[in-house]
């Protein structure tokens, strides 16, 4: 079919820069996600993983949702999925599909969505994070932003703002309905110290004055509960609102490691930034922001409108959840992870516990010399300063944080982790920052629970240590290989 010039309302001519940032930015996040798949999935969920996918699909396949691995799983197929995702994501970052007709980037993003959906639906507890659904939904919507040949569809721009709204407003409401420390503005007296994965600056954020912490929390409430409504207002208000969201997310990036949640939220907020506002700030970019003005062929317009109608219909459930006094956090209402509910940290942990895993080569565990396995992101040795990993997602380290909270659902995979350490499994050892045995098998492995707290300014100056810790108890008594194999 030919172009339909009579539906100029369909074309968002002021959002070519937004489309450029959204398409390439979302593709970068997919690239990071698929690199993590290649590096971590086989060890955690592969044929000899901690929670093997074949066993999961055989046991709970009916609840898994759509996945290529329902047909069959192999580590070789998993690697093919991961590398295909990497190649497609790189092509989108380079803008190659966007240089063609609108169906070309559409197919590329739908391929990323489908491949990653297969991974998430087979990923069990290691992929049970809200930002997995957020990335899937963002990739699905990005598929309908079109190519350089057509104008940016205003329908998709609005749907992306609706996604940002659910992320921000959902997070704000879950805080107000949840832990009292958000309401009395004391949440940040604890959060920077007890968050899942501190960053290199988290210690300094924690040590900011108490009154400033209260100002931070109050400002967060404004950005999450008021600013999202402004995203739907005319320019320049929408761009200002987007800027406030982006600045808040940058603050969170500096203060911790939350995988790609903050980065993706910043990208999605760019859907409210207009070309005119960018040109006003950087006049030299004005000529480069002149994109296509034609809405595109009729089939494309109809398809985008149908998708928009479908998203509106599916929005009933998350909208109802936002208004509910029993609001659910990070809920999916269909097995395709589309149009879900989001939110984070409805409650704040007051104290930090960490599981420390140790091994020894000595014959007897009673009078042995124990050596600590060091994880990449989670706190371990007290003199090891936290690293910056986000937007990369260290799934094993996040699992260790939940384990320390006492979640019984985590123990099955942790038992397998101890077994793999006793076997000196190379895939598992590559997920760690330091193997004290250099690839050799230890005789015994144990796990103890420690209470961690940040050092004070005086302790930091004296010891140069980030943490102070003391033992609280024992999670796993010393295990040897033959004994643990009999148990599992």
Image (cartoon, rainbow, N blue to C red):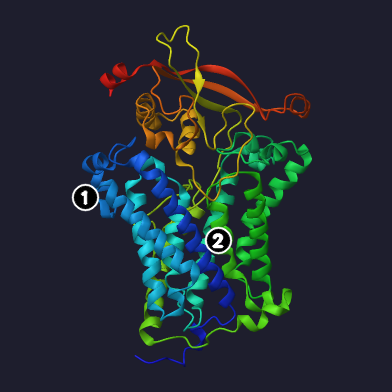
Q: Is residue 201 left or right of residue 379?
A: right
* Crowd class of label 2 (few under 14; some 14 to 19; many from 20; radius 10 Å): many
Give the quarter of the figure containing the N terminus: bottom left
Query: For residue 281, which quarter of the picture?
Result: bottom right
Nearer to me, 207 or 177: 207
User: Distance from label 2 to label 1 (Cα)?
Assistant: 38 Å
Residue position marked by numbered label 2 in the rendering: 165
Nearer to me, 419 or 189: 419
* Circle 2 SS class: helix
User: Is label 2 in contact with label 1 (beta carbons under 8 Å)?
Assistant: no
Q: Residue at x 40, y 35 (%)?
A: 428
| Mark 2 / mark 1, whichever is N-terminal | 1
Q: Residue at x 28, y 20 (%)?
A: 487
- In the rendering, at what x and y percent does residue 213 appear? 73, 42
Identify whether 116 is placed above or below 376.
below
- In the rendering, at what x and y percent does residue 421 appear? 39, 27
Q: Is residue 466 visible?
A: yes
Identify whether 420 is placed above or below 393.
above
Check residue 72 in the rendering and tell me which mark sits there, or answer none.
1
Q: Residue at x 60, y 70 (%)?
A: 272
* Circle 1 SS class: loop
Q: Is residue 339 visible?
A: no
Identify whether 77 is placed above or below 361.
below
Q: Residue at x 78, y 40 (%)?
A: 211
């Amino acid at each position: 079919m030919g172009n339909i010039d009579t539906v100029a309302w369909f074309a968002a001519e002021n959002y070519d820069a937004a489309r450029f940032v959204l398409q390439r930015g979302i593709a970068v996040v997919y690239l990071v996600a698929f690199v993590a798949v290649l590096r971590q999935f086989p060890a955690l969920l592969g044929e000899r993983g901690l929670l093997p996918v074949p066993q999961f699909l055989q046991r709970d396949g009916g609840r898994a949702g759509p996945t290529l691995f329902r047909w069959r799983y192999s580590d070789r197929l998993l690697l093919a999925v991961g590398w295909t995702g990497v190649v497609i994501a790189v092509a989108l970052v380079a803008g190659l599909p966007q240089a063609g007709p609108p169906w070309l980037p559409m197919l590329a993003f739908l391929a990323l969505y489908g491949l990653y959906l297969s991974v998430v639906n087979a990923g069990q507890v290691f992929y049970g994070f809200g930002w997995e659904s957020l990335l899937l939904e963002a990739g699905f919507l990005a598929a309908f932003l079109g190519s350089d040949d057509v104008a940016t569809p205003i329908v998709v721009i609005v749907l992306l703002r609706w996604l940002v709204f659910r992320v921000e407003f959902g997070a704000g409401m879950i805080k107000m309905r949840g832990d009292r420390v958000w309401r009395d503005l004391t949440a940040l007296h604890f959060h920077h110290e007890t968050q899942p994965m501190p960053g290199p600056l988290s210690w300094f954020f924690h040590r900011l004055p108490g009154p400033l912490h209260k100002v931070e929390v109050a400002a967060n409430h404004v950005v999450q509960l008021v600013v999202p409504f402004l995203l739907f207002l005319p320019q320049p208000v929408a761009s200002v609102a987007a800027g406030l969201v982006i600045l808040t997310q940058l603050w969170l990036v500096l203060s911790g490691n939350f995988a790609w949640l903050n980065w993706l939220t910043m990208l999605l907020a760019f859907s409210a930034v207009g070309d005119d506002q960018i040109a006003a700030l950087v006049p030299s970019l004005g000529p480069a922001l002149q994109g296509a003005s034609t809405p595109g062929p009729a089939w494309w317009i109809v398809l985008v409108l149908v998708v928009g109608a479908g998203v509106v219909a599916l929005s009933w459930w998350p909208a109802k959840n936002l208004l509910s006094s029993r609001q659910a956090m990070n809920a999916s209402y269909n097995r395709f992870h589309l149009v879900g509910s989001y939110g984070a940290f409805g409650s704040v942990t007051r104290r930090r516990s960490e599981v420390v895993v140790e091994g020894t080569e000595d014959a007897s565990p009673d009078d042995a010399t124990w050596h600590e396995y060091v994880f990449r992101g989670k706190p371990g040795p007290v003199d090891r300063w936290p690293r910056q990993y986000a937007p990369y997602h260290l799934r094993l380290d996040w699992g260790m944080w939940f384990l320390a909270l006492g979640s019984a659902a985590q123990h099955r995979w942790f038992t397998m982790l101890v077994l793999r350490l006793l076997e000196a499994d190379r895939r598992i050892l590559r997920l760690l920052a330091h193997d004290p045995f250099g690839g050799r098998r230890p005789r015994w492995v144990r796990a103890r629970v420690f209470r961690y707290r940040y050092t004070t300014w005086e302790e930091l100056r004296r010891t140069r240590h980030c943490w102070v810790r003391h033992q609280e108890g024992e999670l796993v008594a010393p295990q040897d290989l033959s004994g643990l194999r009999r148990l599992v």
